[in-house]
Image: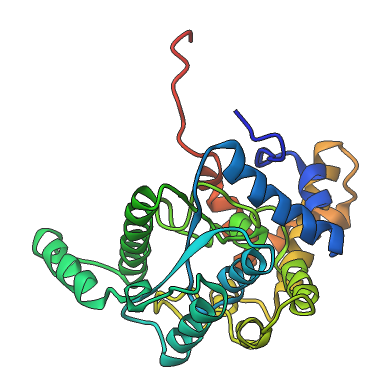
Amino acid sequence: MIHPQGMEIPKEDHYVAWLALLDLKPSLELLDRIALFLTNYLRDNGLACYVLGVSGGIDSAFLAALMHARSIPFVPFSLAIEGNTPHEISRAHDLCRAYGPKDISLSHLQDLTSLYAAISSRFQDVFSNTTRLAEGNLKARLRMMFLYHAAHLFKGCVLATDQIDELLTGFWTLHGDVGDVAPLQLIPKTIEYQLAEMLCTQLDDPIPLKAAMAATPTDGLGISPSDLEQLDAASYGEVEAMLREYFSLQHGRANGTLLPHDKERLAVLQTHTVIQRLESTSYKRQGPVVLNPFG
């Protein structure tokens, strides 16, 4: 069942739907819609609060600041782990203190590095090899285990922070980045930055949010110095432009209207990391595949 204000993720070949989402425009109305969605979800499901992992990046910073500005109850946790830089940790702590509940304490600022090291070491006793990506996934799932445990104890639910750029490029960990409620998942990253700019004018202290907006986006897992490096793109605007062009060309292909030069352009796009990630991560966006017992 979908929440009245919720929306299903479009199917992979619903190109027009993806194009409409990628063409969203920032507005105070959209900012209000996100806040109202979050408020109503708690009320409609009898939940006490959201639990939010605060990384020091724009996504969690934006949601923390929005919930603070609109008096939406939430409990933030900064879960530092191997690979986080001191600047990331410092920004996360500043965000928790600025936008979290007034009784925020050191229990909300946890370093999971030693726990990760113990689990990773134990796993390496079983498996003869590992990779940086596998270790990054392990870190993400360890953090999510902490957040879900907290959500149960606080009678709340876990807030997801990914947006459409990450959704479409598979830039997230299954069972590691997917929470119960995803207010940003169908919103482009470039639009999120512009919404954050609008939100800054409504905050008593916009400095922590502005610091997160100015920071280099990273996965916080130590896989690479920046998210854009992994996507082989100069900006999120470039990522979204490629996605729009790809979906437009695929829509033309499906309708039989592609011209020869369009086919050539589509073939070129399919060699880029962004589109290769899109095409290779469809299974992640489909969720659990459930057998139809009726055949």
The image quadrant that residue 193 belongs to is bottom right
The image quadrant that residue 134 belongs to is bottom left
Q: Residue at horizontal 40%, vertical 57%?
A: 176
Q: How many marks?
A: 0
Where residue 192 appears, x then y in whole percent? 72, 68
For residue 219, above or below residue 19: below
Q: Is residue 70 visible?
A: yes
- Please identify the residue farthest to the left as the structure is shown: 125
Q: Residue at horizontal 56%, vertical 45%?
A: 285
Please name whichever residue, 36 or 173, is drawn nearer the observer in this view of the structure.
36
Please name whichever residue, 20 or 88, is drawn nearer the observer in this view of the structure.
88
The image quadrant that residue 121 belongs to is bottom left
Identify the image quadrant of the N terminus. Answer: top right
Where residue 275 appears, x then y in whole percent? 65, 60
State the scheme by which the image is colored: rainbow
Where residue 247 appears, x then y in whole percent? 77, 51
Left/right of residue 219 with respect to residue 120 in the rendered view: right
Left/right of residue 274 with respect to residue 261 in the rendered view: left
Where residue 88 appears, x then y in whole percent? 47, 85
- Please identify the residue farthest to the top as the structure is shown: 294
Please name whichever residue, 163 or 229, is drawn nearer the observer in this view of the structure.
163
Please name whichever residue, 175 or 79, is drawn nearer the observer in this view of the structure.
79
Q: Is residue 225 visible?
A: no
For residue 188, above or below residue 237: above
